[in-house]
Amino acid sequence: MELDAFRSHLGEGQGRVATADGEHAFVLGDATGGSRAELTEGDFAEVAQDVDVTGADVVRVWLRLRVPDDVPPDLAWVASITVDGRVVGHGTARAGSTRDLTDLIGNVSKLAGTHRIAVRLELVRV
């Protein structure tokens, strides 16, 4: 696996990491802070899983977006939830902000069977 801005500290501040309360979180980005990388519009990190949504009404994710102060003002981070590659919910955070998205939801009530559910963090121009 190539080491890049999203995979250089796996298990420490990226990927599946232990939290202070003994739980685990999946970090798209870097929870430790202080790391620098050259990123451009369109760069992203994503975690996806095939899920049987038969009988489910929604898929839901809780996440926190923390954006460093030095992100250029014309760029922002967008966190989205996708079903089969289609964005069904998203939230945006700009430089210097922290945003809790406590109920990012995708409606799957009309679907049945296995579908690819993903959470994506992408740098976009705003």
Image: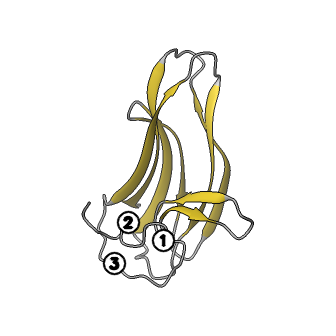
Q: Is residue 38 above or below residue 86?
A: below
In the structure shown, which secondary structural element does the residue marked by tag 3 occupy? loop
Q: Given the image, on which type of amino acid does mark 2 rest?
A: Phe
Q: For the residues carrying marks 3 and 2, which lies nearer the camera in this image? A: 2
Mark 2 → mark 1, Cα distance in angstroms? 7 Å
Q: For the residues carrying marks 3 and 1, which lies nearer the camera in this image? A: 1
Q: Given the image, on which type of amino acid does mark 3 rest?
A: Ala
- Tell whether 2 sits left or right of 54: left
- Tell whether 40 sits left or right of 30: left
Mark 3 → mark 1, Cα distance in angstroms? 11 Å
Q: Residue at x 63, y 63 (%)?
A: 99
Q: Residue at x 47, y 56 (%)?
A: 78
In the structure shown, which secondary structural element does the residue marked by tag 2 occupy? loop
Q: Residue at x 41, y 61 (%)?
A: 126
Residue 113: image location, x then y, percent: 49, 16
Task: Judge by depth and name the residue closer to the eye, 22 or 119.
Answer: 22
Q: Which mark is residue 6?
A: 2
The residue to which callout 3 is attached is: 37
Q: Is residue 4 above or below residue 82?
A: below
Q: Residue at x 45, y 37 (%)?
A: 49
Q: Within 10 Å of the Cα at label 3, are there few (<14), some (14-19), or many (20+) other Cα atoms?
A: few
The residue to which callout 1 is attached is: 30
Task: Judge by depth and name the residue closer to the eye, 75 or 1.
Answer: 1
